[in-house]
Image (cartoon, grey):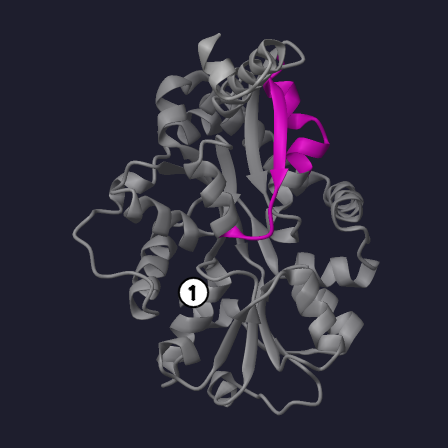
Amino acid sequence: MRFGKELGIPAFVFFAILACLIFVGKRNAGAETNGKPEVRIAYFPNVTHSPAIVGVASGLWSKELPNYTISPRVVNAGPEAMEALLAKEVDFSFVGPSPAINTYIKSNGKALKIIAGACQGGASLIRRADVKINGIRDLDGKSVAVPQIGGTQDVSCRYFLTKNGLKAKDQGGTVDVIPIKNADILALFLQKHIDAAWVPEPWAARIKKEAGAQTVVDERTLWPEGNFSTTVLVVRSEYAAAHPDVVASVLRAHEATLNWIATHQPGAKKVVNSELKRLTGKALASDVLDEAWSHVTFGDDPNASSIEAFAQAAVEAGYQKNTELSLIPLIDTQRLQEAREKRRK
């Protein structure tokens, strides 16, 4: 091989490298694992992602997709999940509405579809016990942590800051909004290096328990009728077009999981806590899990009005410019309706 010689690479090494590159290319395209094609799914180690955690860990996804290998990818926050989706490293993702909307708009509506809801509620603004913050306006001059820039809690935080006449420092305001991984937010609370945090469950409940933090605002109180989507299920558009049968099976698995959680809450909590221990190295105390669970509602409705509200919130928070791109095609629940009907039979 002349190319290998010009690079000074022995022939057997050159062919080994070439084989590896071919293998990696196939893996990136969704190759087979253990003789079965992969269904790659991203989700977070959060209570708000319990439908994903339970569905994968309990085998309900594998039951509905027996001819596929379920390959989970656990991430910290939405933007990380969306980066993986755009890189074609995952096919499905449980994610907050804000990163999903942002990805949809930036791709001119081509990257993904929201195919189901998963969780409503489950996010709060909390503060250190020794810091006087009784409302959002009291964040003036304070520091507040969010899991990741561009994530749903980050957008909510910035949006409600503007509603209260405040802005983040990076937008010319007085509130220091800092992106920090959830586990590190807990450490910073304990060290008294951060004043407040806008976080999903179970982190709000856990930080309250382990660091003595206190709730300032349950985010449910800020939205109409207390309803806002925290987690939705999205699929990569290209994958959905090529594999409609897999999308249908995934939604049947999702419906089966939601039904099992609703009818087996103690068992669902046990599965979630076991997985959180495996993924984060620590299980939740029973009272922490119970509190976190009390702040969420699991269901398959993506809540279109909430999606639209988050899109407007992203504009007002300075993350998005007004766009003429319609959000109507973003939500596609046709196969969800079919999965619901099959579950009722």
Q: Can residue 300 be seen in this view?
A: no
Query: Type of residue at label 1?
Result: Val
**Residue 11: horizontal and vertical position, in percent?**
58, 10
**Toward the viewer: 189 or 161?**
189
**Residue 290: horizontal and vertical position, in percent?**
75, 59
Q: In which quarter of the image is residue 282?
A: bottom right
**Toward the viewer: 161 or 146?**
146
Q: In which quarter of the image is residue 174?
A: bottom left
Q: Judge whether 84 appears above or below 34 on screen.
A: below
Residue labelled with disc 1: 155
Name the residue rendered at 47%, 59% in the picture. Answer: 152
Name the residue rendered at 68%, 82% in the picture. Answer: 128
Question: In terms of secondary structure, where does tag 1 sit?
Answer: helix
**Residue 122: horizontal and vertical position, in percent?**
58, 60
Left or right of 128 on screen, residue 95: left
Q: How crowded is mark 1: few (under 14 residues within 10 Å), some or many (20 or more)?
A: many
